[in-house]
Amino acid sequence: MRAWEKNIRRVAPYVPGEQPKSEKPIKLNTNENPYPPAPGVKQAFKEMDAGQFRKYPDSTSSELIKALSEYYQVEENEVFVGVGSDDVIAMAFMTFFNSELPILFPDVSYSFYKVWADLLHISYETPALDENFCIHKEDYYKANGGIIFPNPNAPTGLLLPLEEVEDIIAHNQDSVIIVDEAYIDFGGESAVRLTRKYENLLVVQTFSKSRSLAGLRIGYAIGHPDLIRAVNDVKNSYNSYTLNMPSIKLGAEAVKDETYFKESLERIVKTREESKLRLKKLGFSFPDSMANFIFATHKDRSAKDIYKALRENHIYVRYFDQPRLDNHLRISIGTDEEMKKFFEFLEVFLSD
Ligand code: PMP
């Protein structure tokens, strides 16, 4: 081994879902929104002056922060923005999880949590979900260095009712609690309003799913001004210019159009509920998802075989080759047309 090699930081990275190169794939594998962003986003993009890109962007992303603070009716100093919620959560890990005690997150949840904890040398415990993939709030009634969980959970789609979220926070006022609400707009009640009641609560959301802007990489957190100040200090000690100019501008545009936002959510929820019925008819079972995906297992065909067969036909779903998850498929909700093709294929494949 060369001398410098022993100093390399070795990590087992997070593996993002595949972005297929094939022509016109049916892409149900990364929980993107199948509909375009609000029309105002397209218009503002057209009007953008590329000449401006010679300058650095506004390091405080004030236009975007203002739009978000108006939408959530909070002060601007209660909002933090980052390059997707991945960046926001990574910054929050760096800022808030510095205790000798382990942080807690469910054994089945967003697989990036473990990667950040390992990278930052944060110790952690992972209370097990029960056999129905449910979180037991009592598992979080113990001393800890912080807590994070997605709500709805990923990849299960299960929603923890807001009273139970609050119960976990109420039992843990000595550490920072992060509720990762990447999928909350598809059917849950957000914990944002609890941030005024609990100073140690940080709620994280994203533009990647409900706002159809995964490509712009915008995420945000809402919490007490002291939490926001602390995470901004860490961000500014790492990279001051995180969001680029188009993301700041177009993100703000997306937030302004509430009518379009609600309509596209309704369409996805309708397709999700119809998809649940069709999956059941085909012999699948799944936790009752409140997100824009369904985590399904089939009564007699292996998830891996179904995944492979779909993939050969340019239909992409997410398969996790991990204990507890390896007989499930996570199927993102596409357009009605995409879901029609997905089901047509499955009907033929499963009747073989
Ligand atoms: N949290 C959860 C639970 C997710 O599934 C994702 C999407 N991979 C993210 C956070 C990160 O999303 P983004 O960085 O696109 O905002």
Image: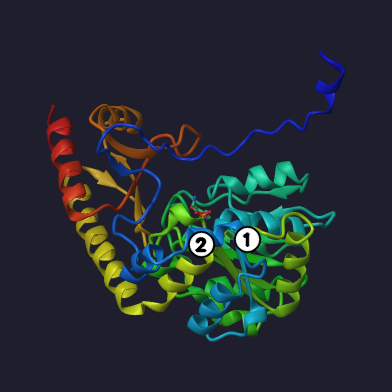
Which residue is tagged 1? 55
Residue 65 as seen in the image, left or right of residue 296: right
Label 2 crowd bin: few (<14), some (14–19), many (20+), radius 10 Å: many
Disc 1 within 8 angstroms of ligand 1 (CB):
no
Which residue is tagged 2? 247
Q: Position of residue 309 (x, y in %)?
A: 26, 28
In this figure, what is the number of numbered marks?
2
Residue at 35% in and 29% down: 304
Residue type indicated by callout 2 = Ser
Residue type indicated by callout 1 = Lys
Secondary structure category for the residue under label 2: helix
Q: Position of residue 206 (x, y in %)?
A: 50, 63
First along the sequence among labels 2 and 1: 1
Residue at 65% in and 79% down: 78
Q: Which color scheme did the rendering employ for the protein?
A: rainbow
Nearest to viewer (mark 2 / mark 1): 1
> From this viewpoint, is residue 120 visible?
yes
Secondary structure category for the residue under label 1: loop
* Image quarter in which the N terminus is found: top right
- Do the residues under discs 2 and 1 have CB atoms within 8 angstroms? no
187 and 93: which is toward the camera:
93
Using the image, determine if residue 10 lies above or below residue 43: above
